[in-house]
Image (tube, grey):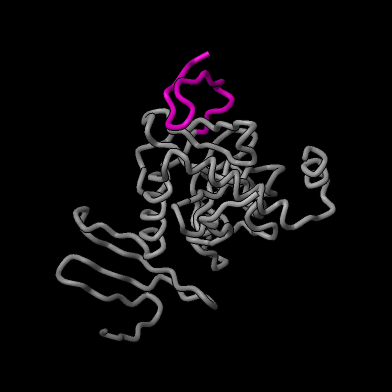
């Protein structure tokens, strides 16, 4: 099995099945088109999107329903075609596509999820892209976890 | 801010080589065509927001994932629901 260096897990072995091929890299990282999807049991439901080209680049992501159980996709026609999905309707999350939101976490600040630009993966082909939700007004900094209190008891 | 009214098909010029044309007008959206030299970067406001948010997401600290996992577990324990996942968690304690 091929191996790669990762930001969080050191050197790992991965299977080609876990490689996502992005039609275009995430915004701001347009040249990064191959990511390995890593799941680590203690960190569940967190999913790591590790760049194969850049060991120091890894996004921390969550399945969108963990953050917003009512989330609705709004993929543009060009997204649907890049993902090789039917053009006449939105795909079903969890059945046809995996929908991940990228997480930003900073000390003493609320943890936020980027609901405006989810990463959508065609579960059949492993084609992926970061889309821009344009039908619904989702925030790119949706606060969903409050920071820990400094004083820890118990 | 300069405000101009345009009909479908009409255009606006910015300088000598940037043209913005109103291609079609829908109920709540307009389709705009932009012609500009390659040296002029064109992107929507939202893309700029997402670009900088991706930079922030990529730059999180090495203990970030562990922190998120801990906060998520704390959230599950605070809001007991009838889902089997929550029941499992309680049995473990």
Q: Is residue A67 left or right of residue A59?
A: right
Q: Which residues are magenta?
A: A1-20
Taking the magenta stretch, the answer to whether it contains residue A11 is yes
At horizontal 43% and vertical 38% (from top left) the residue drawn is B62
Position of residue B66 measured from the top left corner of the image (x, y, whole percent): 54, 40
Number of numbered discs: 0
Q: Which residue is at the front of the view, A25 or A114?
A: A114
A115 in relation to A14, above or below? below
Q: Quadrant of the C terminus of chain B?
A: top right
Q: Residue furthest top?
A: A1
Residue A76 seen in the figure:
no
Q: Which residue is at the front of the view, A71 or B4?
A: A71
Q: Is residue B29 left or right of residue B34?
A: right
Q: Quadrant of the N terminus of chain B?
A: bottom left
Q: Quadrant of residue A58?
A: top left
B25 in relation to A89, above or below? below
A99 in relation to A136, above or below? above
Residue A71 seen in the figure:
yes
At horizontal 35% and vertical 65% (from top left) the residue drawn is B33
Q: Which residue is at the front of the view, A43 or A148?
A: A148
At horizontal 33% and vertical 60% (from top left) the residue drawn is B43
Taking the magenta stretch, the answer to whether it contains residue A49 is no
At horizontal 85% and vertical 53% (from top left) the residue drawn is B82
B58 in relation to A89, above or below? above
Q: Residue furthest front?
A: A154
């Amino acid at each position: 099995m091929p191996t790669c260096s990762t930001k969080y897990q050191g050197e790992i072995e991965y299977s080609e099945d876990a490689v996502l091929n992005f039609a275009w890299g995430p915004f701001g990282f347009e040249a990064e088109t191959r990511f390995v999807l890593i799941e680590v049991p203690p960190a569940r439901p967190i999913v790591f999107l590790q760049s194969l080209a850049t060991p120091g680049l890894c996004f921390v992501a969550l399945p969108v329903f963990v953050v917003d159980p009512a989330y609705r996709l709004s993929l543009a026609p060009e997204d649907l075609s890049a993902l090789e999905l039917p053009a006449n309707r939105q795909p079903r999350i969890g059945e046809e596509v995996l929908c991940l939101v990228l997480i930003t976490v900073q000390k003493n600040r609320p943890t936020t999820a980027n609901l405006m630009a989810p990463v959508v993966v065609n579960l059949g082909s492993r084609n992926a892209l970061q889309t821009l939700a344009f039908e619904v007004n989702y925030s790119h900094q949706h606060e969903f976890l409050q920071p820990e209190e400094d004083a820890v008891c118990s | 801010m300069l405000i101009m009214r345009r009909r479908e098909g009409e255009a606006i010029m910015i300088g000598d080589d940037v043209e913005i044309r109103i291609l079609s007008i829908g109920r709540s959206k307009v389709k705009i065509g932009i012609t500009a030299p390659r040296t002029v970067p064109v992107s929507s406001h939202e893309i700029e927001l997402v670009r900088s948010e991706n930079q922030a997401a990529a730059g999180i600290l090495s203990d970030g994932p562990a922190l998120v996992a801990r906060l998520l577990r704390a959230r599950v324990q605070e809001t007991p629901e009838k889902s089997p996942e929550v029941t499992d968690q309680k049995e473990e304690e």
